[in-house]
């Protein structure tokens, strides 16, 4: 077999190299918490790999992980990689049908979970027939057990860390699947993108190149590790470089700049409304006195992007990426802001076109169409959707991956994001599946039919608020407050509707498909109920 430079693009090998080269250098520093060196991370990940094998996890097996940001998440990820298994990270807000679909589609027999999420697992246990064992990280020593599992075997996290035999010999290559990341469904259930190790590494590799990050940089991460941005760009990027990663458990606009200064961060990522929330903080004379030099901002706000750079003394970089295709578009770091553009093609690694959505024929510069992408290097791109061959074929027709996103490219080769071609809703940086939200709404005994759409957010360009359009059964009664309470028990927080509209009937085509374009066009005028306004009137807000 011909050797390539990509042969070492495997998470276990990358960590092992850094543990040998710089064992005592700090890899991860938790905000207000402990730190861990590269050597310590490798030792603990090796023990996790042994423990997983002791529980019967074989190469290629999927392992569900439902953990908050923390050192344990990275230990588990690296341990899964060393064992040759496949990481399946779960959004910690998942519950009910959202959680059950991913768990069952993945075919995972083992799950690693934070104790705080056990009640969610307990509620879904009868509908998780394949899951056999759950490894629990306790919230605190001696904490009372808050959930009891009837069938699934529960084991403590310490069982994974017990010394044992060395991991069985298995060579993992960049061609092997390293993770399955689930993308929110638009007209169907969430799809699991099969990502080889080469794809995982290339995400970080391009990020490092485009932002010119070095081992001397300090990367500040407050994005969730169950998404590619936080896990691959920032956490894996720091591992590849041997740089220090400062990890916070979540984003806080009020503490963001304090963290940047306190830990001498030089690189960070902002997503969705985060940029605006930071900018809205009261301006202080010393905002620019920090070591931060570059930050990705997706999207970079047209209205105040340049002033953000001035105020905080940082270069903002916009990019475009999806779970399936990596990040093929970046704004060049040496160029001034170009409002609205998500960058130029990274043509060393990708080909891209704007095509007619119905014809797949290339469109001229300036004309809006669908962005399609394909890789130049093998095994550095999604390998398909797990257990969904029809979806894989549909997305890859004519040998291009169809992103479902509407963009255009100008005469100078800069791309501009316009909208989603279908019904995806993006709220607070999360993709909301209207399909899965509708399943929850339609399960309510008072609801005859429901549809979910996104309406433009008042807080940020390109973001949406969730609107539920509901038709009640004859004679049924339901208040908006009661519906929201029902949703909160069964949906991720980011999917809970802001707006509720009770309708006599849903607008439909002659083939009885819901005309969601009509529901979106109706906006939030008239009798539409606004959750945030109602909560503000009560002196509170839970969004």
Image (tube, helix red, strand yellow):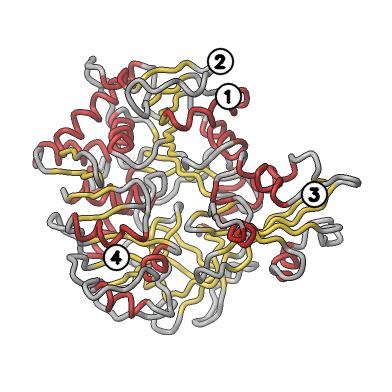
Query: Percent x, y for residue 289?
Result: 18, 70
**Which is nearer the N-term, disc 1 or disc 3?**
1
Q: Which mark is residue 125?
A: 1
Asked whether disc 2 touches disc 1, contact meaning CB atoms under 8 Å apart, the reply is: yes
Vertical comparison of 524 with 119: above or below: below
Left or right: residue 413 compared with residue 389: left
Q: Residues within 10 Å of mark 2 (few under 14, many from 20)?
A: few
Q: Quadrant of the N terminus?
A: top left
**Whole-percent x, y for residue 219 in the image:** 23, 55
Q: Regarding mark 4 in the picture, which secondary structure is present there?
A: strand
Reading the chain from its start, which is encountered first: label 4 or label 1? 1
In the image, 313: left or right of 195? left
Query: Do the residues bearing badges 4 and 1 touch, measured as CB atoms within 8 Å?
Result: no
Q: How busy is the neighbourhood of tag 3: few (under 14 within 10 Å), some, or many (20 plus)?
A: some
Residue topped by disc 3:
449
N-term-proximal mark, 2 vs 3 = 2
Q: Give the distance between the C-alpha atoms of the residues marked 2 and 3, in whole angstroms.
A: 34 Å
Residue nearest the observer in this picture, 216 or 325? 216
Count the numbered circles shown. Answer: 4
Location of residue 501 (image quadrant)? bottom right
Q: Is residue 94 above or below residue 131?
A: below
To which quarter of the image does residue 377 belong?
Answer: bottom left
- Labelled disc at residue 150: 2
In this rendering, the answer to whether 190 lies above or below 255 is above
Closer to the camera in the image, 68 or 163: 68
- Residue 431 appears anywhere in the view: yes
Q: Which residue is mark 4?
A: 295
- Earlier sequence position, callout 4 versus callout 3: 4
Find residue 175 and report its horizontal and vertical position in percent. Answer: 35, 41
């Amino acid at each position: 077999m011909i050797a390539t430079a990509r042969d070492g693009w495997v998470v276990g090998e990358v960590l092992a190299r850094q543990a040998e080269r710089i064992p005592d250098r700090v890899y991860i520093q938790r905000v207000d918490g402990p730190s861990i060196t590269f050597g310590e991370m490798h030792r603990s990940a090796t023990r996790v790999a042994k423990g997983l094998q002791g529980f019967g996890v074989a190469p290629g097996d999927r392992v569900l992980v439902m953990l908050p940001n923390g050192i344990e998440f990275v230990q588990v990820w690296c341990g899964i990689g060393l064992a040759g298994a496949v990481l399946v990270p779960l959004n910690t807000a998942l519950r009910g049908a959202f959680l059950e679909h991913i768990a069952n589609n993945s075919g995972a027999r083992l799950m690693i979970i934070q104790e705080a999420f056990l009640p969610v697992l307990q509620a879904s246990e009868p509908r998780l027939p394949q899951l056999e064992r759950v490894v629990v990280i306790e919230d605190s020593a001696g904490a009372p057990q808050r959930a009891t599992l009837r069938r699934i075997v529960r084991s403590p996290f310490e069982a994974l860390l017990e010394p044992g035999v060395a991991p069985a010999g298995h060579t993992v290559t960049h061609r092997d699947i390293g993770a399955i990341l689930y993308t929110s469904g638009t007209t169907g259930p969430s799809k699991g993108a099969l990502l080889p190790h080469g794809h995982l590494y290339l995400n970080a590799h391009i990020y490092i190149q485009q932002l010119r990050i070095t081992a001397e940089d300090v990367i500040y991460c407050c994005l969730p590790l169950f998404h590619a941005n936080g896990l691959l760009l920032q956490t894996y990027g720091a591992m590849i470089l041997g740089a220090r990663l400062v990890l916070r458990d979540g984003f806080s606009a009020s503490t963001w700049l304090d963290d940047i200064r306190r830990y001498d961060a030089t690189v960070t990522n902002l997503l969705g409304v985060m940029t605006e929330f930071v900018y809205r903080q009261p301006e202080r004379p010393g905002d620019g006195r920090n070591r931060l030099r570059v930050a990705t901002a997706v999207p970079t706000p047209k209205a105040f992007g340049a002033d953000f750079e001035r105020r905080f003394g940082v270069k903002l970089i916009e990019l475009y990426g999806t779970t399936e295709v990596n990040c093929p578009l970046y704004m060049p770091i040496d160029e001034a802001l170009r409002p609205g553009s998500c960058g130029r093609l990274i043509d060393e690694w990708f080909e891209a076109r704007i095509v007619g959505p119905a014809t797949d024929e290339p469109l001229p510069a300036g004309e809006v169409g669908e962005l399609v992408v394909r890789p130049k290097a093998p095994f550095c791109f999604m390998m398909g959707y797990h257990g969904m061959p029809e979806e894989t074929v549909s997305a890859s027709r004519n040998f291009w991956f169809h992103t479902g996103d509407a963009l255009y490219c100008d005469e100078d080769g800069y791309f501009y994001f316009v909208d989603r071609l279908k019904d995806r809703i993006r709220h607070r940086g999360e993709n909301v599946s209207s399909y899965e939200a509708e399943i929850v709404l339609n399960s309510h005994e008072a609801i005859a039919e429901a549809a979910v759409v996104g309406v433009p957010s008042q807080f940020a360009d390109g973001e949406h608020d969730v609107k539920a359009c509901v038709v009640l059964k004859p004679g049924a009664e339901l208040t908006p407050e009661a519906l929201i309470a029902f949703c909160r028990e069964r949906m991720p927080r980011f999917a809970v509707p802001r707006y509720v509209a009770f309708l006599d009937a849903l607008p439909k085509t002659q083939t009885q498909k819901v005309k969601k374009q009509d529901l979106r066009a109706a906006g939030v005028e008239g009798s539409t109920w606004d959750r945030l306004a109602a909560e503000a009137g009560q002196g509170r807000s839970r969004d």
